[in-house]
Image: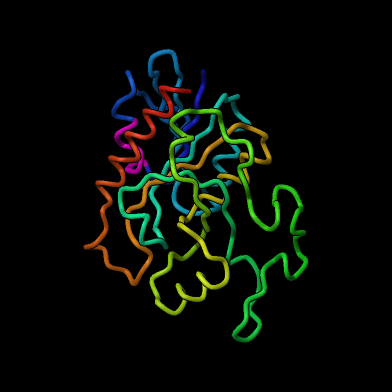
Amino acid sequence: MRILVVTATAAEVAPLTAGLESCGRADGQIARGPRGARHIDVLSTGVGMVAMGVRTSRALLSATYDLVLNLGVCGSFRQDLAPGTVVHVIADLLPELGAEDGDAFLSAHELRLLGEDEFPFQSGELRNVNPPDNHVLRQLRTVRGITVNTVHGNAASIARTVERVDPDVESMEGAAFMYACLVAGVPFAQVRAVSNAVERRHRAAWKLREAIDALGDAAFAIIDRA
């Protein structure tokens, strides 16, 4: 089985790459190594939607994969999604894609620049309706994410976003990854670990190490059951 793991930064998947046998590096951003009978490619794209979308698409055009996983950390809008919680993002959307109209915001769908169900969107969202049949993946809490260029750190903008789209988590790359995989028609999953609450920036409260360790454990479990 050939598996592609996609991450924004190598640090987010450091436990995974450390656990690969004879991990080598090829093609710039891709680290390669076996895990048992599974061949793992780990692609570090760089931060943000543009880097994630372009480099994921390029990787999917360059090779054929049986499974594609996006692994990374995220911020949580929910008190019951505490730091260290690993989630499966099955729907993601782009809340910044649109136009301001005074104090109002009009989405690209409301502007009719995109149809609500124009491929690969479904009701304005990017959805993973056929995730991989994986026992470990099925045990993870499923959530709805948003992907942003600027992570939220202002109480007023957080409140507006919650009122408008009511997300569970946020990242800077998830929707771009899902878009690329939906277009390519490959089996995929976006799996993230909560590193912090979405609030005014308070880095001292982040649990980044704990999130990365939990993500690594989940990644090994998913891959070993693939």
Q: Quadrant of residue 11?
A: top left
- Counting from the top left corner in percent of width and height, residue 10 is at 36, 40
Report the residue at 54% width, 41% height from top: 55
Q: How many marks?
A: 0
Q: Within the magenta stretch, is there residue 218?
A: no
Going by the image, does 128 lie left or right of 217? right
How is the protein colored in the picture?
rainbow
Which residue is at the far top?
37
Q: Quadrant of residue 214?
A: top left
- Counting from the top left corner in percent of width and height, residue 35 is at 38, 19
Vertical side of 83 occupied by 18: above or below: above
Which residue is at the far bottom?
102
Give the residues in magenta.
10-16
Going by the image, does 188 lie left or right of 78? right
Report the residue at 47% width, 34% height from top: 137
Residue nearest the viewer, comparing 172 with 51: 172
Report the residue at 52% width, 58% height from top: 146
Residue nearest the viewer, comparing 187 with 79: 79
Vertical side of 223 occupied by 166: above or below: below
Magenta stretch: dominant secondary structure: helix
- Counting from the top left corner in percent of width and height, residue 53 is at 57, 47
Vertical side of 144 occupied by 22: above or below: above
- Counting from the top left corner in percent of width and height, residue 120 is at 70, 47
Report the residue at 32% width, 34% height from top: 217
